[in-house]
Image (cartoon, helix red, strand yellow):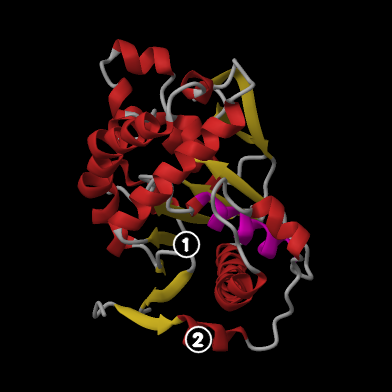
Amino acid sequence: MRPTHLEFSREEWAALRSSTPLTLSEADLAELGGINERLSLGEVSDVYLPLSQLLNLYVAAAVGLHLASDEFLGAGSVKVPYVIGIAGSVAVGKSTTARVLQALLSRQPDGPRVELVATDGFLMSNAALDERGLLNRKGFPESYDLPALLRFLADLKGGAAEVSAPVYSHHVYDLVAGERQVLRQPDIVLLEGLNVLQPQGLVSDYFDFSVYVDAHESHIEQWYVERFFALRAGARNDPSAFFHRFAEMPDDELVETACNVWRTINVVNLRENILPTRDRAHLVLVKGADHAVERVQLRKL
């Protein structure tokens, strides 16, 4: 156990749920799960419900602090969203974590408005990456439009009436020209991405709380290969999809291709950039081989 964090087994963490009701159904989970990741109500109840309860306490405390500060300064109240960063490797399940938390947090009695933003939208376009010789470094810190991401977060935390983020399509694996995700003073924002905890640029300075989704490297590689097959299957009859190019590739060649991409790009990014930021997270979800969370590590206050 790291000295700066408290460590809980899944059972110990689940006991902190208290009497918080579960507001999601099996049908909800079918929509929230990842491409090759299936959630159970048991995991949501044991892991994500206590986390959402903790986050509700933190959000309430932050709102109270803002109100007290405004009263002391004699200033008008400006609505500032609570921002939660969610980091982790490709294929580790951070998007699923973000979607589940969004669903749980938005179903609280006070009905907060919860927005989910992926930093994929702040990647440079494929054309721009190609021009800079960075197409094979997609997802690495240098492949993002960091100034645009920082402006977005500064406006968001500055209480702007409206902010917007570019939209990325996993269907074509590129930015969608002219499309924006518009946020109008939400209560909570989940910002999910590979490198959101990087010290460069200090994106994490805008976070009120952060989560790192962790697993053994070998497990993530297996999940990545499985996802490669799932994406190929979904794109088999759709020529416009990025993964349609692998439609006729024999399975053994597809495995070799997926493993090569993992070895030359994704695991390099994980080792050099993503994993070193793990200890900067307020909370770490540690997964086992079956994609289920086994342990939770919470930074000491």
Query: Tag 1, which secondary structure?
Result: loop
Q: What is the crowding at mark 1: few (fewer than 14 residues within 10 Å), some, or many (at least 20)?
A: some
Q: What is the crowding at mark 2: few (fewer than 14 residues within 10 Å), some, or many (at least 20)?
A: few
Residue 244 as seen in the image, left or right of residue 144 = right
Residue 168 as seen in the image, left or right of residue 275 = right
Look at label 2 and name its amino acid: Glu
Residue 217 as seen in the image, left or right of residue 168 = left
Look at label 1 and name its amino acid: His
- The residue shown at (64%, 57%) is 102
In front: 176, or 35?
A: 35
In front: 221, or 132?
A: 221
The residue pinned by badge 2 equals 11
Instruction: State which tag comes first along the sequence, 1 or 2.
Output: 2
> x, y percentage for residue 237?
64, 22
Place residue 74 in its image quadrant.
bottom right
* Relative vertical location of residue 92 with respect to residue 242 in this rendering, above or below: below
Are dots 1 and 2 in contact, CB under 8 Å? Answer: no
Place residue 57 in its image quadrant.
bottom right
Magenta segment range?
95-107
**Which corner quadrant holds the C terminus?**
bottom left
> x, y percentage for residue 228?
46, 37
Task: State the separation of the CA atoms marked 1 and 2.
Answer: 16 Å
- The residue shown at (62%, 59%) is 100
Task: State the predominant SS element of the stretch in magenta.
Answer: helix
* Relative vertical location of residue 2 with respect to residue 99 in this rendering, above or below: below
The residue pinned by badge 1 equals 291
Query: Tag 2, which secondary structure?
Result: helix
**Which corner quadrant holds the N terminus?**
bottom left
* Relative vertical location of residue 291 with respect to residue 13 in this rendering, above or below: above
* Relative vertical location of residue 153 with respect to residue 105 in this rendering, above or below: above
* 106 part of magenta stretch: yes
Q: Is residue 206 visible?
A: yes
